[in-house]
Image (cartoon, rainbow, N blue to C red):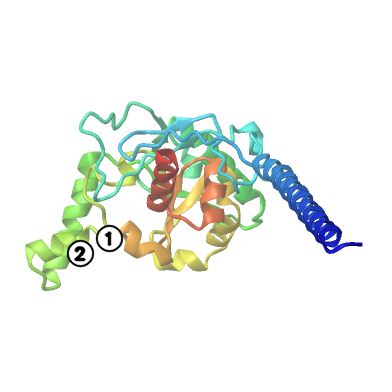
Amino acid sequence: MTREQRHKAIIKRRIFVICCLAVLALFTALVVFAVKAVFGKKSEGGKSEVSVNSESSDVISSSEQTISDSTPSYPSVGPNGLDANYSILLLVNDKNPLPEDYDYEGNLTTIPTGYINGMLNQIDKDVWNYMKAMIDAQRETQTDPKNWLYVRSPYRSYDTQKMLYENQVTRQINAGLSREEAEIKAATVVTRPGRSEHNTGFSADFNIAEDSFESTPMFTWMQEHAAEYGFVLRFPKDKQDITGIIYESWHYRFVGINTAKEMNRLNMCLEEYVEYLNGKKEK
């Protein structure tokens, strides 16, 4: 073989090797693309569109369950055939007063005497169905009526709330605070009128409005089962800096069965949950 023939043979081998490498690279790229496509479709299959109807200044009553990417699938029917998707997410606190045209008494019902342990006896009529089912279920677990769940302080009128707030302000002034300081301190114990959940008819204090309620069988049962009926502990011990209200083991708020379950799963108070939903709505 001449030098020229050897040179041509070397060039042909090099061309062959380059072509093989190019084919191998193309094949590898196709395999990687196919794998990504397959697994990408699988991950997208677990996602669902989120539709959130949440405004901090409006009452939100919905029969459609809001589901995030990681939200469990909750049943649509609760105990006693209750609508588990019905929810009320009206956020009322010192920074979010009730609208000026809020109807304080238009949707109330009277709570039967056997369920009341106090002077006040009205609650939102839609909430009562859930509250009654919860109280009945708790009582079925107790042989001693002393351990029965009772409603102590449900709906309060604007004037009643104003009286309670002013009484608390007076106590703080008598304790040595100035009027301005007393008003700020009082608002962490008794919410200002028009800014209290008791003005909505969606909340209630149960049995005794004292720290000792935390040590009762009623509190223990509610911690375990209240969400099954749509109620959450409104002012948790570890959320005081967010709610602006002292820990109240006796104060529960109706938000809706599946909403309550989701709030507990996320360990969120109502302020956090409304902000969470609004954040998802903006995405």
Most extreme residue toward the front is: 2
Evaluate whether residue 197 shows in this view.
Answer: yes
The numbered mark at residue 24 is none
Quick check: marks 1 and 2 in contact, CB under 8 Å? yes
Residue matched to label 1 = 189
Q: Which residue is mark 2?
A: 185
Farthest residue toward the top? 106
Q: Nearer the viewer, residue 251 or 238?
A: 238
Most foreground residue, 43 or 212: 43
Q: In the figure, residue 46 lies in which quadrant?
A: top right
Q: Residue at x 52, y 43 (%)?
A: 259
Q: Which element is circle 1 on? A: loop
* Residue lying at 51% horizontally and 40% vertically, measured from the top left: 256
The amino acid pointed to by label 1 is: Val
Question: Residue at coordinates 86% horizontally, 58% vertically from top-left?
Answer: 5
Quadrant containing the C terminus is: top left
Q: Residue at x 42, y 66 (%)?
A: 238
Which class describes the residues within 10 Å of circle 2: few (<14), some (14-19), or many (20+)? some
Residue 199 in the figure: left or right of residue 83: left
In-front residue for pair 244/144: 244
The amino acid pointed to by label 2 is: Lys
Q: Position of residue 280 (x, y in %)?
A: 45, 43
Q: Separation of disc 1 and disc 2 at Cα?
A: 7 Å
Residue 215: give x, y in percent of width and height: 51, 68
